[in-house]
Amino acid sequence: MAGSPHREPDVEESESLRSDANIAGPMADPVPGPRPADSEPAPGPLGAAEVVSRETRMPRPDQTRVMVVANQKGGVGKTTTTVNLAASLALHGNRVLVVDLDPQGNASTALGIDHHADVPSIYDVLVDQRKLSDVVQPVRDVEGLFCAPATIDLAGAEIELVSLVARESRLDRAIKAYEQPLDYILIDCPPSLGLLTVNALVAGAEVLIPIQCEYYALEGLGQLLRNVELVRGHLNPKLHVSTILLTMYDGRTRLASQVADEVRSHFGQEVLRTSIPRSVRISEAPSYGQTVLTYDPGSSGALSYMEAAREIALRGIGVHYDDSRAHTVGHQPVGHQQQQDQHSMSEGLQ
Ligand SMILES: Nc1ncnc2c1ncn2[C@@H]1O[C@H](COP(=O)(O)OP(=O)(O)O)[C@@H](O)[C@H]1O
Ligand SMILES: [Mg+2]
């Protein structure tokens, strides 16, 4: 992307970042306290490299972890989570492939990957059984990060797959035949539970569900969980929900902490201690074909995704995560139960 992105003052970022020394960790500004937004260094890949060079590497798993980022609701942060976790893991020494399984191709866009109609894509892999290695592209600016892009063709794949043999396991086969060594494969699902999502659930072992901290956050999740059970029972015995990530958390609202409490009481251990704050930088980054990790590596959004990735990496090798790092600004201590309003936000799970 040419030129330096236009910078809006970002009060929420500078406040959140500076008021929480834990999450800033080794990347903390040497001068503590709030800083004016316009004094921030220009975002860009160099900044990310500098930040990361001061960071410890994240542990690599023994085997490739295939994580399916799913929630049939749109706009909950699936794509944002996929690309930013993937970038965090790659920037810390992992080899990571993002599989864009949404016809809208938002993950491809956010990673700066060309995905116009003529580009070899995941559609060709699923429908024409093209090799995955024929469509994978390296992501500019982030070493070790790769993307299998989605083009608009994928919109027809839900229908076209119906009449094909092994229609549920085409992605699984393609991934198993992929010869490059990988630590993680993150699959960004479309906002539906059709054959594309089923292909992801058959290919993966872990399901990662981003949950937006808003009312009705859990609505419809019961259906996703039932689908996970069905796929586990019939097609993929190793499938399980391993990770829940709270997204767009706004610590200033009572609702956000209520939703967080509700989600934690339902899912318990699967919920990452780190939650992702609502952040202007996170939402700006895709329009520059970047993840927030390279766009503004010191922002609270980048630091939170980095911390969430660290938690995922540590869980993968069975290491206990130090809770004190997980605070997002305004986030209530884990287990803190706010007085509940008369409605239960988990009604959707019934
Ligand atoms: N933590 C966040 N703070 C601010 N905006 C966010 C955050 N996470 C996601 N968004 C924005 O919300 C919208 C929906 O996110 P997206 O990841 O595309 O959801 P999904 O893939 O589930 O449809 C996008 O415009 C994205 O930039
Ligand atoms: Mg999406």
Image: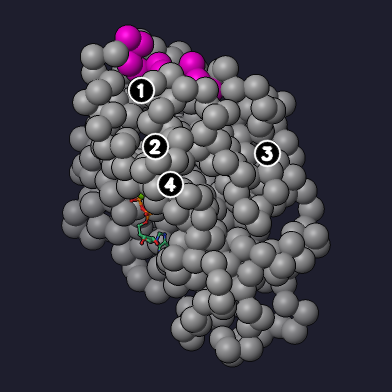
- The C terminus is located in which quarter? top left
Closer-to-camera residue (141/238): 141
Figure quadrant of residue 62: top right
Whether residue 142 is visible here, answered yes or no, is: yes
Q: Position of residue 64 (x, y in %)?
A: 63, 27
Instruction: Estimate the spatial distance between the alpha carbons at disc 4 and disc 2, rounded to whole Å.
Output: 12 Å
As drawn, which residue projects farthest toward the front? 118
Who comes first in sequence, dot 1 or dot 2?
Answer: 2
In the rendered structure, the answer to whether residue 65 lies left or right of residue 209 reads right
Who comes first in sequence, dot 4 or dot 2?
Answer: 2
Q: Position of residue 99 (x, y in %)?
A: 48, 37
Instruction: Estimate the spatial distance between the alpha carbons at disc 3 and disc 1, rounded to whole Å.
Output: 26 Å
Q: Which amino acid, mark 3?
A: Arg
Tell me the SS state at disc 2: loop
Who comes first in sequence, dot 2 or dot 3?
Answer: 3
- Determine which residue is flagged by label 1: 127
Residue 272 lies, with reference to residue 181, above or below; the image says below
Whether residue 277 is visible here, answered yes or no, is: no
Asked whether residue 89 is drawn in magenta, I would say no
Q: Residue sitting at 39 percent across and 47 percent down?
A: 116
- Determine which residue is flagged by label 2: 101
- Determine which residue is flagged by label 3: 95
- Determine which residue is flagged by label 4: 115
Q: Which amino acid, mark 2?
A: Leu
Residue 290 lies, with reference to residue 199, above or below; the image says below
Q: How many marks can you see?
A: 4
Instruction: Estimate the spatial distance between the alpha carbons at disc 3 and disc 4, rounded to whole Å.
Output: 21 Å
Q: Alpha-carbon neighbours of circle 3 within 10 Å: few (<14), some, or many (≥20)?
A: many
Q: Which amino acid, mark 4?
A: His
Instruction: Estimate the spatial distance between the alpha carbons at disc 2 and disc 3, rounded to whole Å.
Output: 19 Å
